Amino acid sequence: MKNFTSIKDVADLTALVNLAKEMKSNPLAHRAAGKDKTLVLLFFNPSLRTRLSTEKAGLNLGMQVISMNADQGWTLEFEDGAIMNGAAAEHVKEAAGVISQYADVIGVRSFPTLIDREKDYQDKVVYSFMRYASVPVISLESTIRHPLQSLADVLTVEEFKKVDRPKVVLSWGPHVRALPQAVPNSFVEWMRHANVDLLVTHPKGYELAPEFMDGVRVEYDQKKAFEGADFIYGKNWSSYLDYGKITNSDPNWMITPDKMALTNDAKFMHCLPVRRNVVVADGVLDSPNSIVLEVANNRTYAAQAVLKTILDQL
Ligand code: AN0
Ligand code: CP
């Protein structure tokens, strides 16, 4: 694994999940792996979980960790051949090259514009860093994917499943703001490589990009989708078809205890942050079946497995 931006960078998912389990059982066992190595994390957008869990993963491996908020006052140019007489003070060619002088591994978070679909789906920020950095790059949630989240999601399902091939339902829920499709895109991309029966439910108009959904089952009746589910994964996303728009905010799509009662005593998962009583009702988040904090805990070990794999190859 040179870089980590999608499932395509993973040679053996089972082996990576097993490594994450091993990290969880003894988080400080590999402190020598990252000795004298520096992890630099760049955040073009805010983060609570990704920032703290990836920092902690690096620290657990003995790395030195530097995080930088890159969301204000530092505008980069990403276009080849640009005449830089606008707002951007620096080209990613120099920026990625310079950071590579200080870092052994670089992490980058960059959200979509949700305005220009074609441009967003080129995932330019993370791929530009990969192209111009001379050290490995990991995605801390790119424009269209969130692989560290998805690895933690696969690990969590693996830990909590009661049957060999559980029914996992990704359910859209309403939200007041337009959110990226990165988490659901990635969730689908990873779960179809895991041993699960995957079903996606959302209102008409919220279909995800065909490049992620090819062959994945969709059920437009949320209640029907919940029947017999072993895991419900709640998440809002904005429309891909009417790009970046909120085309439906029907409160009847909120995930409620009544709907959870239709499942096979399903565990409830969410990547967080979550808006209570908008996406998901208190009664679900506060129930014993909610494992949202365990998902967040697993973010550390997902990141630690990825960093360990990369460090071993430096
Ligand atoms: C972000 C998103 O939906 O992609 C981050 C979640 C991991 N969520 C918000 O901005 C609320
Ligand atoms: N789940 C997740 O990535 O959360 P943050 O946006 O807080 O990092």
Image: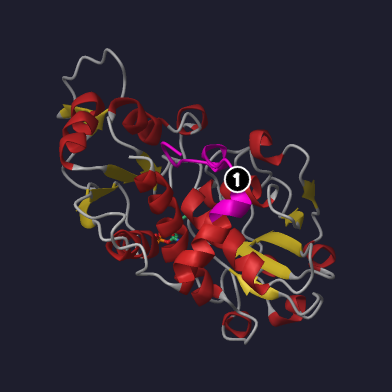
Q: Which residue is mark 1?
A: 12
Relative to 85, is 105 above or below? below
Q: Left or right of 48: which side holds 226?
A: right
Q: Within the image, what quadrant is residue 260 found in?
A: bottom right
Q: Within the image, what quadrant is residue 154 found in?
A: bottom right
Colour mapping: secondary structure
Residue plotted at (45% across, 64% down): 301
Please state the total of marks drawn on the protein image: 1
Q: How would you rate the neighbour count of disc 1 (Cα within 10 Å): few for under 14, some for 14-19, many for 20 or more?
A: few
Residue plotted at (81% across, 54% down): 219
Task: Name the residue nearer the viewer: 53 or 240.
Answer: 53
Image location (x, y in percent) of residue 32 = 28, 59
Task: Name the residue nearer the viewer: 210 or 107.
Answer: 107
Relative to 159, is 108 above or below? above
Residue 235 appears anywhere in the view: no
Residue plotted at (46% across, 33% down): 120
- Position of the C terminus by quadrant: top left
Image location (x, y in percent) of residue 67 = 22, 54
Let me know if residue 87 is in the magenta part.
no
Residue plotted at (43% across, 48% down): 309
Residues rendered magenta in the picture: 1-16
Q: Left or right of 196: which side holds 150?
A: left
Q: Within the image, what quadrant is residue 73 found in?
A: top left
Q: Left or right of 172: which side holds 92?
A: left
Q: Disc 1 on helix, strand or loop?
A: loop
Task: Name the residue nearer the viewer: 190 or 78.
Answer: 190
Does the residue tagged 1 have its C-beta within 8 Å of any atom of ligand 2? no
Image location (x, y in percent) of residue 140 = 39, 49
Let me know if residue 9 is in the magenta part.
yes
Amino acid type for the residue under numbered disc 1: Asp
Residue 288 appears anywhere in the view: yes
Image location (x, y in percent) of residue 114 = 47, 41
